[in-house]
Amino acid sequence: MNQSEDALIRQLKQGDQSGFTTVMEMYQDLVYNTALGIVQNATDADDITQEVFVQVYLSISNFKGESKLSTWLYRITISKSLDHEKRKKRKKRFAFVQGLFGNNEEEQHPVEFDHPGIQLEKKEKAGQLMNAMKQLPEKQRIAFTLHKIEGQSHHEIAAIMNTTLYAVESLMGRAKTNLKKILHNYYQEKFSDT
Amino acid sequence: MKKEEEIQQMINEAMNSLNNIQRASPAPYLQTRVLQRLNKTRETLWEKAVWFIGRPAIAVPAMLLLIVVNVVAVLVNDGAAISAVTEHNITGSNDEFSFSVATIYDIENQEP
């Protein structure tokens, strides 16, 4: 941890408003982009970003400084994003049960996600990859998202996920294999339809 | 065969589609929204605390405990006050009636 980060954390721990504003300015894109990669919905990612910073403000006293501030922020963001997804799935299940009893007021259709940071010519393919990513097991999805969307190295991912470098490499390998399988099935179906 | 090759190419294109992705930014005025939410959370925490204390399961035992503590305090203080008064009375009686036993030795060695 460098000196300026150390001073910033001290400011935060003292409840200094300007320190908190600086942290938000520095890390808002990191938090938002990570949340967006996981939940694949701009409104939800914005909501999660707010939750993350509220959590940072309330629990900065628990931050021991053993890792970098960004690593801690990544951990909170991932945890909040996964919680958000679980809540959403529960709501969907509840809506489904309500639908069985004829109480379904509004049916929501999944929309293909369009990440604002992707080049125009790659948008279609990226949308298909992002859809495939949704089907990956949780840990593989997190490792792949951190690497591909946030551009984190395997070392940094290991620190964020609190695991070994070997485990991250293994997760990435399995994620790529699974994604290729999912995409293969998707394109095969697409070809057979046309 | 050609179909499989095309599929493989599409897979490769999809797998590489996230290369050089730009970081997305949140909607404007994030800080204002966070501070607003933070204030709301603080209010909610107080509301939660009041609700927790106000629950009958907490409020009734707390009231009983308060009453018991008060009763015990009154009884303990009352006992201490009585014993202090008694002690004072005994000392007073001793002084008044001179209950101490005087011996010949005491009388002979009295100082002028």
Image (cartoon, coloured by chain):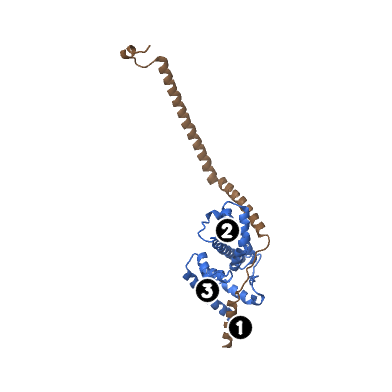
Chain colours: A blue, B brown
Q: Return the x and y of residue A92 as percentages of the image width and height.
A: 60, 65
Q: Residues within 10 Å of mark 3 (few under 14, many from 20)?
A: many
Judge from the rendering whether residue A175 lies leftward or rightward of residue B111; answer left or right.
right
Label annotation for residue B69: none
Quarter of the picture holding the C terminus of chain B? top left
Residue hosting label 3: A175
Question: Numbered disc 1: what chain?
Answer: A
Residue hosting label 2: A4
Q: CA distance from mark 2 to mark 3?
A: 37 Å
Label annotation for residue A191: 1
Which three-letter amino acid code belongs to the residue tagged 1?
Phe
Number of marks present in the image shown: 3
Name above or below for residue B58 compared with residue B80: below
Q: Return the x and y of residue A152 as percentages of the image width and height.
A: 55, 69
Q: Nearer the viewer, mark 1 or mark 2?
A: 2
Q: Nearer the viewer, mark 2 or mark 3?
A: 2
